[in-house]
Image (spheres, grey):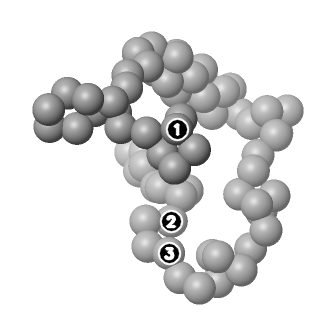
Amino acid sequence: MTRLVSRFPLCWTREHFDQPTEYYLTMEENMSSEELAGLEKLQAYVNSFIPARCVNRVGNPVFDAKGN
């Protein structure tokens, strides 16, 4: 029987924030075929998102301080 184990911490501690960004990055060359398949599914899912504007309750667009 295979047990699924999360490789991403679900509870963050101060030590997690002390790590550099590179600590959490994995190069595609180092990924297994299963991990690459999961990455492709994730990329397809994210690419399916439709851009939308943030609007207030009245329906007017919401902008940041720079007008974006």
- Which amino acid does the dot numbered 1 rest on? Gly
Answer yes or no: do the residues labelled 3 and 2 have beta carbons within 8 Å? yes
Q: Nearer the viewer, mark 3 or mark 1?
A: 1
Q: Nearer the viewer, mark 2 or mark 1?
A: 1
To which residue does mark 3 refer? 12
- Which amino acid does the dot numbered 3 rest on? Trp
Answer yes or no: do the residues labelled 2 and 1 have beta carbons within 8 Å? no
Q: Residue at x 64, y 76 (%)?
A: 17
Q: Quadrant of the N terminus?
A: top left
To which residue does mark 2 refer? 9
Is 29 left, or right, of 40 in this rendering? Answer: right
N-term mark: 2 or 1: 2
N-term mark: 3 or 1: 3
Q: Secondary structure at mark 1?
A: loop
Compare residues 28 and 43 and report the one nearer the observer: 43
x, y (%) of residue 29?
Answer: 85, 32
Q: Is residue 25 above or below residue 15?
A: above
Is 39 left, or right, of 4 in this rendering? Answer: right
Compare residues 41 and 31 and report the one nearer the observer: 41
- Which amino acid does the dot numbered 2 rest on? Pro
Is 63 left, or right, of 35 in this rendering? Answer: left
| Residue 49, visible in the rendered structure | no
